[in-house]
Image: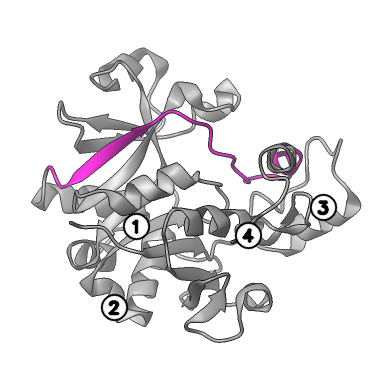
Amino acid sequence: MNTHANLVILAGGSSSRMKKAASDRSGLSNEEIKQANERNKGLIAMGHEGRPMMDYLLYNSKKAGYQNIYMVIGEQGTLFKEFYGEKDRDNTFHGMRISFATQYVPKDRVKPFGTADALYQAMEQFPELNKTYYSVCNSDNLYSKNALEALRKSTSPNAFIAYDRGSMQFSLERISRFAVTKLDKDGYLLDIIEKPSEDKIECYKDTKGKTRISMNAFKFDGAKIYPYLENCPVHPERNEKELPTALLNMLKDYPQTTIGIPFSEHVPDLTAKEDIVKVNKYLREKHPQLNWE
């Protein structure tokens, strides 16, 4: 069995899109706008209890069976430690152990170097991740307990949640920006295609006729993925080292080792200020209270 209890949460990004001016401020309070401009997206207060968005992700993670949480934060991420523990390693939070890896920015850059670099730096700072399996997800998406549990319990050495694009409750314009995945007949990942034209979408549907997208929820064999993170090339347009690039490079050497786990559900996403109202509404309806027991 390849099950595990380790989750890496990527929270070291610069949240640049969140800091842009809102095209529609209706429903947004002055405090929400202030937090959106000053905080990491995962720390914006949400729901009835006014706790960070991260609380809800951690809540679902605990219910999914994760015990060891590794948060990758930026060099200015001290606010995370005010909420989740002052130590670099093994802070206790509702029965979970929370550790912090720092994603340092190279001297010749202003912004962090991307998601592959974030995970690489976490593995350098916590070498135990090189010897085990672990899951990885974003800090600004609220993945369900069932999706996180499916990753943790997957017997494939590597896996990702293959979401049905049609189940996403986003605008068509926003959905069109998501990368589409190509799976073989057994459900293993073959390719990730960025922004395919609608006339080519049919080519990438799975055996059930569904278009599958990735929302950056993965499970990895630490020993296998490590060298591909370390040697991940820089994306020519975005100038970042991206996790899907490292994964696809690994698959060239180890094909049929990353299963797509099919899911049909919405994933609340906190990218821009306009998302705050929608995510807040979702949390107030679906999570009126967090019962950690």
Residue bearing the label numbered 4: 55
Q: Does the CB distance between marks 2 and 4 fall below 8 Å?
A: no
Element at badge 3?
helix
Q: Where residue 95 sits: x, y (%)?
A: 52, 71
Element at badge 2?
helix
> Farthest front residue?
293
Picture layout, residue 67 above or below residue 217: below
Mark 2 or mark 1, earlier in chain: 2
Of circles 2 and 1, the one toward us is 2
- In the image, what residue type sits under mark 4? Asp
Start-end of magenta stretch: 256-278
Residue bearing the label numbered 2: 128
Task: Report if residue 268 lies within the magenta region.
Answer: yes
Q: Which of the 4 image quarters holds residue 113?
A: bottom left
Residue 253 or 263: which is nearer the viewer? 263
Alpha-carbon span between mark 2 and mark 4: 25 Å
